[in-house]
Image (cartoon, helix red, strand yellow):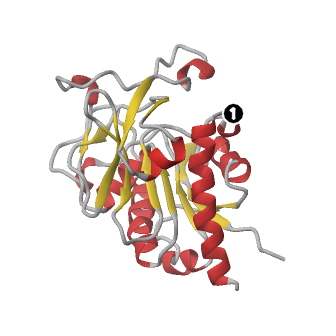
């Protein structure tokens, strides 16, 4: 019997009342099940951290999720953070380390929103902290006064790189995606190839250059109602193929 691939999801460390909690958004957990057909497991963001090498040896894939927090800027710049900017140092330490280890250990990675930014920073790239304050960039944040269905609805097109992974998944060079982020890639991390750009030129998706393990990172949220959107579903299915291949290699 073929074993179901196991996908790890690094958690957020959230303070709820007097106690810290380890949390992963249910929509990401659901997307691993419904979109990829894999078994999701939570990877706690602890200080001191767990043995990440041992964790990755037991995984067939890694999903870096979105979050309400932003990466602390000292990881990629000497710029100060801004007042009210929500941070999660435990997740930063966990996820940034996991990216480099996953590449070295050939663990497939799918990264979404904050996850894309984690991939870029882990590989030496940098971020714009406030896209909406930089001339030339469009508004990429959601309107939080709207219901979730509107916030996560397609917001703008992205142009897909010719011959790229996303273009093969979509079967076309342009698709509509949602947009719920205030930060974005400034300088591209080492070894990354651009897969998609927004009309204002912002990098919206990257992959690891060939040859290398499966690593796809997108700035939008394909986990949202993943089975209802063929393009979003295709992204998770491509990830699932890579996870199944690793599971087969680990357990022939």
Is residue 145 shown above or below 236?
above
Quadrant position of residue 140:
top left
Please tell me which residue is depicted at 24% across the width and 62% down the height of the picture: 190
Residue 250: image x %, image y %?
Answer: 64, 83
Please tell me which residue is depicted at 28% across the width and 35% down the height of the picture: 202
Judge the density around disc 1: few (<14), some (14-19), many (≥20) Cα neighbours within 10 Å: few
**Residue 182 horizontal side relative to residue 8, left or right:** left
Question: In the image shown, does 146 or 1 lie closer to the viewer?
Answer: 1
- Residue 19 can be seen in this image: no
Question: In the image shown, does 75 or 99 lie closer to the viewer?
Answer: 99
Quadrant position of residue 215:
bottom left
**Residue 88 horizontal side relative to residue 13, left or right:** left
Is residue 137 shown above or below 108?
above
**Residue 134 horizontal side relative to residue 149, left or right:** left
- Identify the image quadrant of the N terminus: bottom right
Residue 189: image x %, image y %?
Answer: 26, 57
Residue 188: image x %, image y %?
Answer: 24, 52
Please tell me which residue is depicted at 67% across the width and 47% down the height of the picture: 31
Is residue 229 shown above or below 241?
above
Task: Work out which residue is located at the far bottom of the displayed protein and give it.
Answer: 252
- Identify the image quadrant of the C terminus: bottom right
Task: Work out which residue is located at the far right of the displayed protein and give it.
Answer: 1
Residue 220: image x %, image y %?
Answer: 47, 37
- The residue tagged 1 is 228
Q: How many marks?
A: 1
Task: Work out which residue is located at the far top of the displayed protein and give it.
Answer: 145
- Residue 18 can be seen in this image: yes
Q: Secondary structure at mark 1?
A: helix
Question: In the image shown, does 131 or 217 lie closer to the viewer?
Answer: 217
């Amino acid at each position: 019997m073929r074993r179901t691939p196991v996908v790890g999801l690094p958690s957020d460390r959230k303070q709820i009342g007097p106690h810290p909690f380890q949390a992963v958004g249910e929509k990401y957990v659901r997307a691993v099940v419904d979109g990829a057909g894999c078994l999701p497991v939570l990877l706690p963001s602890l200080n001191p951290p767990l043995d990440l090498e041992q964790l990755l040896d037991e995984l067939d894939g890694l999903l870096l999720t979105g979050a309400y927090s932003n990466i602390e800027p000292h990881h990629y710049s000497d710029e100060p953070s801004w007042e009210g900017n929500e941070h999660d140092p435990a997740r930063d330490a966990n996820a940034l380390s996991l990216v480099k280890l996953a590449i070295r250990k050939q663990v497939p990675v799918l990264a979404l929103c904050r996850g894309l930014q984690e991939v870029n920073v882990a590989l030496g790239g940098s971020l714009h902290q406030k896209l909406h304050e930089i001339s030339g960039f469009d508004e990429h944040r959601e309107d939080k006064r709207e219901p979730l269905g509107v916030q996560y609805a397609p917001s703008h097109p992205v142009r897909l790189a010719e011959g790229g992974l996303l273009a093969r998944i979509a079967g076309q060079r342009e698709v509509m995606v949602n947009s719920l982020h205030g930060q974005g890639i400034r300088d591209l991390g080492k070894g990354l190839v651009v897969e998609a750009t927004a009309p204002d030129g912002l990098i919206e998706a990257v992959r690891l250059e060939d040859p290398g393990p499966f690593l796809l990172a997108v700035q939008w949220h394909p986990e949202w109602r993943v089975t209802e959107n063929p393009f979003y579903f295709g992204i998770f299915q491509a990830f699932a193929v890579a996870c199944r291949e690793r599971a087969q290699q680990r357990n022939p």
